[in-house]
Image (spheres, rainbow, N blue to C red):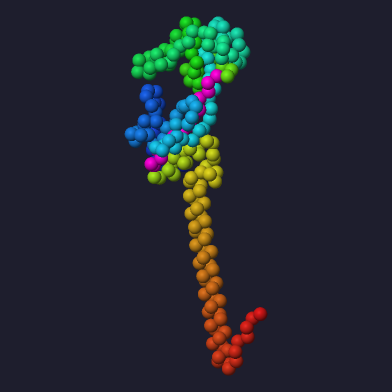
Amino acid sequence: MDRFAERYPDVQLVAARHDEGDILQLLADGTADAVFVRYRGDSPKDATRHVIPLYEELEVVCAAKDHDVEYYEESIPASVVRSFAQLDLADYPEEVTGIPVAMEVVASGAQVACVPQSIARLFHRKDVIYRLIEDGNPTQIGIAWPAAMEDTALVDEFIGIVRGRSANSSRQASVRQDQQQAKKVNDQAKAKAKAKAQEAAKKAKQQAKSKARASGSKPRKRR
């Protein structure tokens, strides 16, 4: 967001979390121009929206310290994870309790929670550890925007920033616009110079003819 603001200081960019309901509905009702969407399996791209995949997030299991999960140094087999009592995040909706309370239950040792790695990091607690799940169920993170959007220059710029392109990258919308404008100016200058040269050549030819007539001889053709 900071990089976007640096490039477009006159454009207001507002970001908000959306923890409840289908985030893609924000595109359908015009609430958002673009959204980050998490999905598994097939892309949610359809006739109404474009979706570009950005990166994949691995699945981890969160457990209390001193839980059997802690015996595994880096990763734990999925079959072992399934043997533990599982916590369902759907039982902890944001408007009631949310993930922080779910993590309190995990910290008690009563259950473990399988979540994307970024969620485990975001709601990290000193009394909760997590391990990567071998053969887990990863999720894909993508950015989506309405297919009906006519002017996508700002969205293209934002996507480029998210994907790590520099301000001078030729793939950035703003850079392409500058390059196209520069090419247009250059082409116009070349066309003007060519027209001027043609006019000068035509004028010189006419002067040579006039001079030849005045001297009573024909101008010689250049080979």
In the image, the segment drawn in magenta is 136-149
Q: Residue at x 52, y 75 (%)?
A: 199
From what the image shows, is residue 173 above or below residue 111?
below
64 lies left or right of 49: right
Expressed as whole percent of the image width and height from the top left, the position of residue 52 reads 49, 35
Q: Could you say which quadrant of the image residue 13 lies in?
A: top left
From what the image shows, is residue 140 above or below residue 206?
above
69 lies left or right of 28: right
Q: Residue at x 58, y 94 (%)?
A: 216
In this view of the protein, which residue sits in the foreground, 58 or 108?
58
Expressed as whole percent of the image width and height from the top left, the position of residue 60 reads 53, 17
Expressed as whole percent of the image width and height from the top left, the position of residue 124 reads 49, 16
Image quadrant occupied by the C terminus: bottom right
Q: Residue at x 44, y 44 (%)?
A: 153
Residue 139 is one of the magenta-drawn residues: yes
Q: Residue at x 41, y 16 (%)?
A: 90
Name the residue at the bottom extreme: 216
